[in-house]
Image (cartoon, rainbow, N blue to C red):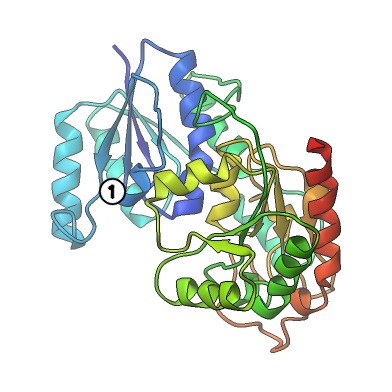
Amino acid sequence: MKNVVILRLSALGDVAMTVPVIYSVARQYPDVRFTVVTRPFFRRVFINSPSNLSFIEFDAKGRHKGFGGLMTLIKELKRQRFSAVADLHDLPRTRLIRSVLRLNGSSVAVVDKNRRGRKSLTKGKQREFQQNYVDRYAAVFARLGMPVELDFKSLFEEEGKRCGVGIAPFARYKTKTYPPEMMEKVARELTSAGVDVTLFGASGQEQGELERWVERNPKLKSLAGQLPIEEEIREMSRLRVMVTMDSANMHLASLVGTPVVSVWGATIPQCGFLGYRQSVEDAVRVDLPCQPCSVAGLPECPLGHTACMRQLQPQQIVVKIQKIYNQYE
């Protein structure tokens, strides 16, 4: 029986982008055993996974910490004698892992990150669309002799009535985050129109910020810091529209077939990170000469103004939301 190990250690949004590919290939090759190596928290995204899919948790803070821990992980992987390695990450850790497993007899395929194309976007300010990462991941399995049709639809089989709008207003970096006071205006305009709005965010600072939104507008509902990630994803599956940044929440909503209005600043959809089966027509952005300044985002704007976000008017986002929302009427 063919035995394939899949390497994608982080981050949450990137791991989520692997799900449509991994579920599709696992279901189309039921006689192959697939094993995903990822962090324990990210493993929880793989809801209702195919029966021939298993997991090895990369415990970066425990038994796999540091170089010694990485060697422990490699020993664990060697014992399983994988016939093939699908490296969907291509960073120093996974390079070492795949090199050792290749010497152990595994065939290897690696994701093509197209660094030259990414440089043309950030340095040359080109606007040509780079291949989406979901398709890049699929290409890895094709190189291992397993071409895959991306037929994944949702983590959940049943689909009930969709209602309301979700807003996840935060991202890892300021340059990828629409100013909260402006996104709060979006939320207020929606509730004023009678739309149920649910807010999503992490515990701690994000939770506190969203609770203040609710204090100022009791028509809002915040789930920040209240649910495990599996239940948050379930809540996303019940929405008509999800509003996100270029962030993990865009990809989590995509895993349950929820349309996403995505807001882009330092990064742009052309970088290849648009959510699975999401439309570029639903991406809200301005087109400044300085965009994109990064493929994955930066802590601070290199020019000090974050105009790529601040020039977006709340009404532009509201119009995109209403267009999708009204299709359910």
Foreground residue, 197 or 39?
197
Which corner quadrant holds the N terminus?
top left
Q: Is residue 197 left or right of residue 3?
A: right
Image coordinates for residue 9, horizontal then vertical, percent: 36, 50
The residue at the point 83 percent across, 43 percent down is 326
| Residue 250: percent from left, percent from top | 60, 51
Q: Secondary structure at mark 1?
A: helix
Name above or below for residue 72 compared with residue 19: below
Q: Nearer the viewer, residue 112 or 238?
A: 238
The picture quadrant where one finds residue 102 is top left
Does the rendering let one see residue 128?
no
Q: Quadrant of the C terminus?
A: top right
Residue 271, horizontal then vertical, whole percent = 69, 55
Residue 295's image quarter?
Answer: bottom right
Side of 172 relative to 63 (left or right): right
Provide the residue designation for mark 1.
40
Please tell me in which quadrant of the rendered image residue 238 appears: top right
Residue 26 drawn above or below residue 59: above
Q: Nearer the viewer, residue 304 or 233?
A: 233
Point 81% across, 61% down: residue: 318
